Image: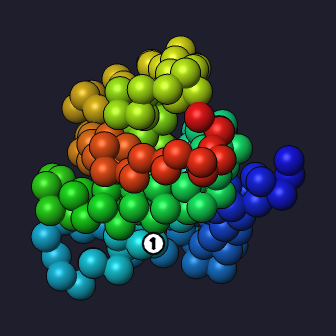
Amino acid sequence: MLKRLTPVLALIGACWIVFAVNLVFWQGHLNQYGIVPRHVWSLPGILWSPFLHESLRHLTANTLPLLILGGILCARSRVEFMEVAMGGIVLGGGLTWLLARSGCHIGASGLVFCLFGYLASLAFFRRTIGTFLISLICIFLFWGILRGILPTASAVSWEGHAAGLVTGIGLAWSAPKPKSGRKTAD
């Protein structure tokens, strides 16, 4: 089972390593390389932003949901996790870059919202007992995060959250349906 979780554990490990290195060697200055909307020089920030966190509290707040939602998706398929994670980083980050308010957007919460959107909406698009149970579990455990798409605090990238959620739902909608005979967790 641990082998199945390798991709999500590696992603979380990378977040923690980047946080530690950024804090110890650069005193947090790498955070300026997140997503700065509509500035061409910040396009690489789309890839870097999920690994950059403002504080230990910010990182720990993203770690548990990333572990649980990513773990559920890895249990289904490691390849599916990697596809959704990369899609969430690139597409969700791209939407944040295009549509968010001015500022520097960092953190893995957009990816958390992408994973949630993907898993919570999967039953709607696949209509199997397995996807229904997964969607139900994710909604039951994490429905409260949906408050994060509301503009409640200036320091919170609600736009990144909304972009991640929309991206996750879009990825679930566009995911190929398993061919009959192909073994899946559905």
Judging by the rendered image, the residue that carries numbered circle 1 is 48
Disc 1 packing (10 Å; few <14; some 14–19; many ≥20): many
Residue 122 picture location, percent across and down: 42, 34
Q: Is residue 135 above or below residue 17?
A: above
Compare residues 92 and 18 and report the one nearer the observer: 92
**Residue for point 65% across, 79% down:** 25
Residue 140 picture location, percent across and down: 53, 15
Count numbered badges in the picture: 1
Compare residues 28 and 124 and report the one nearer the observer: 124
Compare residues 40 and 131 and report the one nearer the observer: 131
**Residue for point 69% across, 61% down:** 7
Residue 119 visible, this orientation? yes
Q: Quadrant of residue 42?
A: bottom left
Q: Is residue 10 above or below residue 59?
A: below
Q: Does 51 sit left or right of 75 as displayed?
A: left
Residue 53 visible, this orientation? no
Q: Quadrant of residue 161?
A: top left
**Residue for point 42% across, 40% down:** 118
**Residue for point 35% across, 27% down:** 124
Residue 46 picture location, percent across and down: 35, 70
Residue 58 picture location, percent across and down: 54, 45
Query: In what quadrant of the picture does the C terminus appear?
Result: top right
Query: Label 1 sits on what residue type?
Result: Trp
Q: Is residue 109 above or below residue 68?
A: below
Q: Does 8 sit left or right of 112 as displayed?
A: right
Q: Which residue occupies the extreme front position in the image?
A: 181
